Structure formats: structure tokens, C-alpha cells
Image (spheres, rainbow, N blue to C red):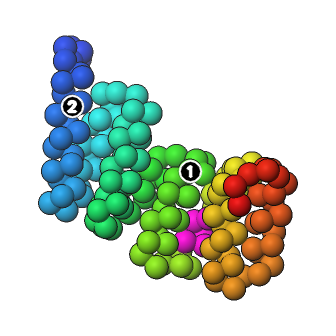
Amino acid sequence: MASRPPDPHPARRLAGLRIAHKVQIQLAQFDRASADFDKAIQLDSSEQVLLWYRSFAAESSDKAQWQAAFWYLDRLIAARPQESVFYGDRGRARLKRNQLKEAVKDYEEAVQRNTKDPQIWREKGRLDINQGRWPEAARAWDKALELDPDGDH
């Protein structure tokens, strides 16, 4: 079987996939969007594609397009389950949706994956206070203060 020659215009093809992808998400064609995600990863570094997804997730969340926002966030977490920032992003989106139990789980995942981020500890502490989870709130605030004693609390 003969191999295909390299794509002479990968950047142009990637830009086309990015546009098609946004249209598919708006039309709730998530299977097609997933296929385009796989193609984009093959054409470019996964870092660039993941940056796009994070910006698309934020944009969708800002516009209260929840199905799209969570679709992006779930893909980011599946692609990089060790990255705490994606759990924090999803936790914030869940808070906007008043999905408090799910937000708590995401924040717990975030702090487990990055124990040195005082901001995520503060966010978790605020959520724990709002949920009446006093021992958890105290631990989160203690950790935030330990990491950043002079920070914005």
C-alpha cells in the first residue's frame, strides 16, 4: 500500500477544520466535531488544539451554551486528565449552572492534581463554605494561606 504524500497546506486545512468544528458544535453535531478533533490533532500539535478547545469552552460558558461548554471541557479532561486547570474550568462552569455537588468533585480533582495552586484552593474553600462543608473549607483556606500568605483572599 502506497503512503500518502504529506499535506502541502496543513495550516490551511487546520484552519478549515477549526471553522467546521465551531459550526458542528453550534448545530450539536458532536460526533462530527469529535472526528474533526481527531483530524486536527493529527495535523498539528495537540497543544494548539487543546488551547482552542479551552478558549471555545470559555466562550461557550460565557454565552451560557452549556451543552457545548461541557462537551469541550469533558474532551479537555479526557485528553489531559492530569491537568488540574481543566477540572477548575469545569468546576467554575458547574457553579454557573448551580451544579454544586459536581462542582465540589471537580474542585477536589483540581486540588489533587495540583496541590500548589493557591487560587484553586481559595476557590474550593469558597465553595466548601457555601456548601456548609466547614472542615473541608478550613483545610482549603489553610492550604491557600500556606501557599500564598500575602495573596488576595
List x then y, in percent, for residue 116: 75, 48
On screen, residue 53 versus residue 12, left or right, reads: right
Mark 2 closeness class: few <14, some 14–19, many ≥20 residues within 10 Å:
few
Per the image, the residue denoted by label 1 is 85
Q: With 60 as the anchor, is 91 left or right in this view? A: right
Other residues around mark 1 within 10 Å, as few (<14) / some (14–19) / many (≥20): many
Q: Residue 17 occupies which quadrant of the picture?
A: top left
Check if mark 2's residue and mark 1's residue have beta carbons within 8 Å: no
Amino acid marked by disc 1? Val
Image height check: is 72 above or below 12? below
- Whether residue 59 appears in magenta in the rendering, the answer is no
Place of residue 46 in the rendered image (x, y in percent of width and height, measured from the top left): 42, 34
Q: Residue at x 50, y 64 (%)?
A: 92
Q: Main secondary structure of the magenta part?
A: helix
Q: Quadrant of the C terminus?
A: bottom right
Residue plotted at (31% across, 41% down): 38
| Kind of element beneath mark 2 | helix
Residue at image coords 76%, 66%? 140
Total tally of numbered discs in the picture? 2
Image spot of residue 8 (x, y percent)? 19, 14
Residue range highlighted in magenta:
103-107
Label 2 – label 1 distance at C-alpha = 26 Å
Point out the image quarter for the N terminus. top left
Q: Secondary structure at mark 1?
A: helix
Name the residue rendered at 19%, 18% in the picture.
9
Name the mark on residue 15: 2
* Residue 32 makes an appearance in the image: no
- In the image, taking residue 39 as reference, residue 23 lies left or right, namely left
Residue 50 placement: quadrant: top left
Name the amino acid type tagged 2.
Ala
Q: Earlier in the sequence, mark 2 or mark 1?
A: 2
